[in-house]
Each structure stands twice: as structure tokens, then as C-alpha cells.
Image (tube, rainbow, N blue to C red):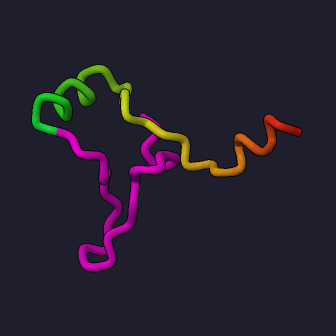
Amino acid sequence: MDCENCAYYDFDDEAQEYFCTALLDEDEVYRISQNKKCPYFRDGDEYKIVRKQN
């Protein structure tokens, strides 16, 4: 998975770690861990759309 580039992958100051902030239940977490592909992945590159327009 490409979690490091996902918009849902945020740093928690208290825990000093990165976490997935997408709202997932246990079944979804298991399915993602088996498939290695997250259906909730959202590219965190906010300039991607602008580059496509140019």
C-alpha cells in the first residue's frame, strides 16, 4: 500500500506516530490487509489537479 502518500495518513502529536484517519471497521481493515489495495486511498498531492489543467 502507498499509505505515506494518502490524504488520510496523518501524524498524531501525542503518540508521535502516523495513523490512518479513514473511518474503517474491522472487516475493512482485514480486507485491505489481505488485498494490499485500499479503496479509500486519496492522493494527498493537492497540486495534481492544477498540473492536469495546464
- Residue 31: x %, y % from top left: 21, 24
Residue 19 falls within the magenta-colored stretch? yes
Give the left or right position of residue 1, taking residue 32 as reference: right
Above or below — where is 19 with respect to 12?
Answer: above
Give the left or right position of residue 50, taking residue 23 as reference: right
Residue visible at 24% across and 73% down? 15
Residue sitting at the far right:
54
Name the quadrant of the C terminus: top right
- Residue 28: x %, y % from top left: 19, 30
9 or 36: nearer the viewer: 9
Residue sitting at the far front:
53
Above or below — where is 1 with respect to 7?
Answer: above
- Residue 47: x %, y % from top left: 71, 50
Give the left or right position of residue 52, taking residue 48 as reference: right
Residue visible at 33% across and 77% down? 13
Above or below — where is 53 with respect to 7?
Answer: above
36 or 38: nearer the viewer: 38
Residue sitting at the far left:
26
Name the quadrant of the N terminus: top left
Q: Which residues are magenta?
A: 1-24
Kindly indicate the quadrant of the structure image that contains residue 32: top left
50 or 25: nearer the viewer: 50
Residue visible at 30% across and 20% down? 35
Residue visible at 30% across and 46% down? 22
